[in-house]
Amino acid sequence: MPSRNGASSFHPATSEPRDTIAALATAPGRGAIAIVRASGPQALTLARRLFRPVAPRGDLQPRLATFGAIVGTDGTQLDEGLALYFAAPHSATGEDVLELHVHGSPAVARDVLIAMFAAGARRAEPGEFTRRAFESGKIDLPQAEAVADLIASEYAAAARAAAARLSGGLAQRVDELRAALEDALEELSASLDFPDEVEAPSAERLRACIDGVRAGIGALSATYERGRLIREGAAVAIVGPPNAGKSSLLNGLLENDRALVSEIPGTTRDTIEEAIGIGGIAVRLIDTAGIRARAGRLEAAGIARTERALADARLALVVVDGSAPLGENAQALLARTRARERVVFFNKSDLGRSGYDRRAEPERAALFGSVRDPASLDAVRAALEAALATNEMIDLARPHLGTARQAAALLAADRALAAAQATLDAEAPVDLVSGDLMLAVRALGELTGREADERLLDAVFARFCIGK
Ligand SMILES: Nc1nc2c(ncn2[C@@H]2O[C@H](COP(=O)(O)OP(=O)(O)OP(=O)(O)O)[C@@H](O)[C@H]2O)c(=O)[nH]1
Ligand SMILES: [Mg+2]
């Protein structure tokens, strides 16, 4: 059955008839509506038993919402709501699908689900709806992974990237690379089968093929690195001398009094981490103990953690007191963060500006303000956003990798091709590259799901929630 991408089924259909699965499709808890969904050959049977349309000719039409009563298997009315029926193969799973939209009470949703079980459905496993969509060829494996990522994404950038991957393209690109290798393999095997009639492909021909595929793999792999910021977010370490206002800045950016603030230098002893979204990107803000040269033992332990956080951070947010002349701790910290990516904030503008006015040339672009002024907080947010966005974005319109699994599959393919290249470099007989080419073909097939075995699929779909 052709999917919307024109790809054929990825997975051989099992010969045994499938059962019908059911689960709550909306988030658990109270809401305006709850949707209980079933997929499988019994979907229409469930509708006949559990749904009574109000209109006289209210029989369920595929893809048309019908209003009526939802009843238990004993005929008790559970709620009023909508029934939506999708006939196979024109549904998300490729199977018959029934959705019952009821009022969003956890009790009603649970009763409707139990009624579905009583009428013959079985509780769906995590990700089983999406898995059925994959197995019926509606989506490929990277698209299924994009569904999980889209649902899991908390910030706009990650959601947009997952949405872009949902519309496909990666599997097609990988298929092209795979097809090039399969062509070469076919030529090799024909020359082995019919040595008198078919000439073996030349080493040059194979080399060109492998080079081309490795270049394609390299381009795709680079998108994984570039997507790191979107996937994992960025760690931003707030560092500065004691009492500069680091914890106040963390609280201001979070709009929440998360960290203890006091006029006593050395208030923060341990690093504190909180996530916020800045410019649609997940940012892990890390408040740290103030850095100063002469510190007691406990404070020194805190400073050691600060140093670690600073070393690991994607970006340093350096906070100093700009109201007074800079002390030696501030000067030392500014000097040693000059070589790295950072945002410098001269704080406490309400108290004076002598520190800011006498700042050194490398700090000319520094921000000046007060954590008590919302405009300053906006300026810090904007500076963080600008610093994080620089050339770390992927082109969402082009195929790009989304998961570590996909990156690992590409790496495996590339390793096999590197080995094939080494064989050619050693001027060995060309047919000796066959094994490595086959390994590469297999790894690429695992990426798209065309050669995925049960274990791999179990691992992919275990990441999903129930009902998806
Ligand atoms: N007037 C004024 N006071 C500020 C400003 N920012 C912070 N403070 C005060 O400065 C003191 C220190 O603030 P904190 O946020 O605890 O400073 P810190 O950098 O986290 O200090 P340590 O954790 O000790 O390293 C507190 O009394 C704050 O209220 C500001 O912009 N203006
Ligand atoms: Mg603090």
Image (tube, rainbow, N blue to C red):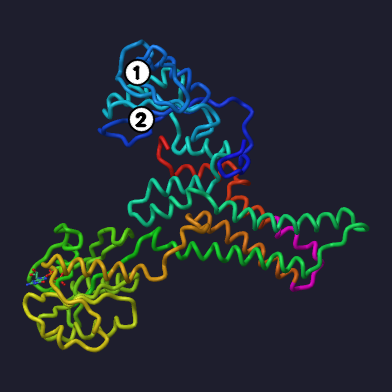
**Where does the image place residue 119, in percent across and percent down from the top left?**
43, 17
Residue 35, numbered label: 2
Q: Is residue 436 magenta?
A: yes
Q: Main secondary structure of the magenta part?
A: helix
263 relative to 329 in the view: left or right? left
- The answer as to whether callout 2 falls within 8 Å of ligand 2 is no
The type of residue carrying mark 1 is Gly
Residue 227 among magenta residues: no
Q: Position of residue 145 (x, y in %)?
A: 48, 48
Residue 156 appears in the rendering: yes
* Mark 1, other Cα within 10 Å: few <14 / some 14–19 / many ≥20: some
Which quadrant does ligand 1 occupy? Answer: bottom left
How far separated are the C-alphas under marks 1 and 2?
A: 15 Å
Which residue: 70% across, 69% down? 421
Amino acid type at mark 2: Ile
In terms of depth relative to the viewer, which is nearer, 389 or 265?
A: 389
Residue occupied by mark 1: 68
- Classify 62 as above or below 453: above
Residue at image x 19%, y 64%? 250
Q: What is the x, y in percent for residue 150?
A: 40, 48
Which segment did they paint magenta? 425-438
